[in-house]
Amino acid sequence: MKFMNKKRFASSVLAGTLALSLAAPALAANNTTTNIAGSYADIPIAVVVPTTGTAQINPYGLPVSITKSNDSTVDLTGQKITTRPLSVKNQGAIALELGVSSFIVVPKGDVSVAAAADNNKAIKVDLEVAGLDDAALAIASDNEKLDDLLIDRFAAVATWAGAQKLAAPTAAKGDTAADITAAKTTNPMATLGAATVKGDLTTYGKDSIALFRLTGDLAQEPATDPWKETDGFESTIVFKFTPAAPTAGDATLTLDNTTLSAGGSLTATFAAGTSGRSVVAWSWAKAGGADITVTSAANDNKATVVEGSVSTGDTATITVTATLDNGATLTASCVYTK
Amino acid sequence: MKRKVLLCVLTVLVLFCSTQPAAALLSNERGTVIEGDARLPIIRVVVPTRAEVLINPYQMPVEIDGETRREQILCTPAVIASTSDIPLKVSITITGAVKEESDMTLATAPTGGAGTSKSAFVYFEIVQSNSDDVISSLWAKAYDPAKHIPVVPGTPQTRTDIMTLPPMTKDNEVARGGYAQFRLTGDAVWNPTTEWNRKDGINVIVAFTFTPVPYT
């Protein structure tokens, strides 16, 4: 059988497709169906991350002076790898988990990167991230004090006590970026709290900022060849930000009664602790207890419990839920026994 | 047509190049490049290359820098000063020898001026200070083997980590305690059987070693 030529065949297919496309809306209308178009709404990540930074191989831990806005200086001392202050700031209205999707250190000069420093020029390099939780930092993003406060926090030893670490992958002397398998972590290295955004004004939360640095270890006096000015490295870090589930922090929710019988009332009490959170909505729910009724005014932290006349033993778990201003929820329960 | 093709290829290449860095990062990723260089300590100590020592057994008046002095072993002022950016431990090796033409000897303990052999006891003293001037009051009153280094002919005498000089100030000046004055001093037999003469004398080499102290 002689088949139609290719051009004619393609033309027929295209015509068919066009006809199908045009006919679809009419068919949908006749069948009273609803088309729901689903598309991915990209989550806007509003973070401030420095594109560059500087560090030093500093075998003797010489002081590196950081000058503050009032010309006073803060010294970073005793660090064999010394990094000038670096920070990541969340300027968005949602909390973010900060992860690292790529971390490499490309050695320069005679340097190599290893899991542990040796007595020559193999250096160990770690990326450290310290999430801050400090009410003094809950200030406007353009506040002149912010940089100075961050310098102080960066220089404080205590800041780094709980820092998360990610070791740099090994790299031989002369390796290029292409030769190195990047390190990464699936666990968040910090959670950056949401900022409050009102118009052009962004105010950080007390936990919206994390500091980061390169640190590590190296030989003070390499056995075979002293340190030279040509020795160094170039590190590239790619931070990954994903929305964090909102948390209540140390806020708590309690009921005045955890058990109840013969009717009564319940009052929920919210304590913010140091979280800075507040309740935006209350709701009550009941599980079990068909003959037990819980009533509450709309969006109220108080409820009244009434039992019916059916004289059978009955229990219900009454739960109050407080929705916080950041979307986190807290619950408390009372067991009612009839 | 060739021109158009070339233009298109170039445009595509330009677009590709200019979008490459952005394409490497996802919308929820941000990158930082940290340049690391080597910070090496600056070791900078001014050390006099030469000083004069005089054996003055009869305690004749000798004028040095406008000051009349009468010690039996006299030394011209000598001070070291550190403008390093790191603390330095100072170690010293003293090597001494009697001049070839001399028949004097070097004693291994103070003579107290007594005796009949033509002998002198010479020791090295160094004291940390805040000034580039020699301050006489800082010198010890007497020889102390724990602090001083005797000049022993032919046998180098070394003391390690005898002091630590602080780093320079933030104004790049010598810090307090960043100076150290040193001298050779001692005593000599007052009236030896063979009299002291112009041929008598010693040569002493003072070698300083400066070791950086890491910050912790």
Image (spheres, coloured by chain):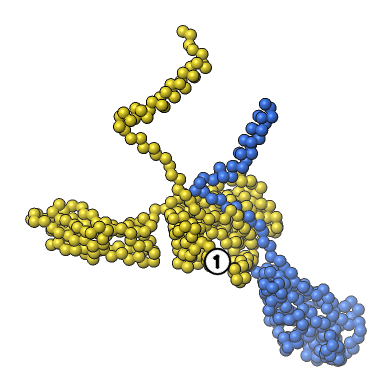
Q: Which residue is mark 1?
A: A144
For chain B, give the colour.
blue
Q: Residue at x 61, y 42 (%)?
A: B18
Left or right for A204, reference A281: right
Q: Please name the amino acid that badge 1 sits on.
A: Glu
Q: Secondary structure at mark 1?
A: loop
Q: Residue furthest top?
A: A1
Q: Residue at x 83, y 76 (%)?
A: B50
Chain bearing mark 1: A
Give the percent coordinates (x, y) of residue A333.
24, 59
| Observer-nearest of B114 and B49 | B49
Q: Is residue A129 visible?
A: no
| Observer-nearest of A336 and A81 | A336
Left or right for B71, reference A58: right
Give the percent coordinates (x, y) of residue B194.
89, 88
| Up/down of A32 relative to B158, above or below | above
Give the percent coordinates (x, y) of residue A100.
51, 51
Q: Residue at x 63, y 59 (%)?
A: A56
* Rendered image quadrant of residue B197: bottom right
- Crowd around label 1: few <14 · some 14–19 · many ≥20 (10 Å): few
Left or right for B97, reference A169: right
| Observer-nearest of A210 and B121 | A210
Q: Is residue A230 visible?
A: yes
Give the percent coordinates (x, y) of residue A172.
63, 48
* Rendered image quadrant of residue A313: bottom left
The chain letter corresponding to yellow is A
| Up/down of B96 relative to A267, above or below | below
| Up/down of B2 relative to A281, above or below | above
Q: Residue at x 21, y 61 (%)?
A: A303
| Observer-nearest of A200 and A223 | A200
- Where does the C terminus of chain A fall, quadrant-wise? bottom left
Label tally: 1
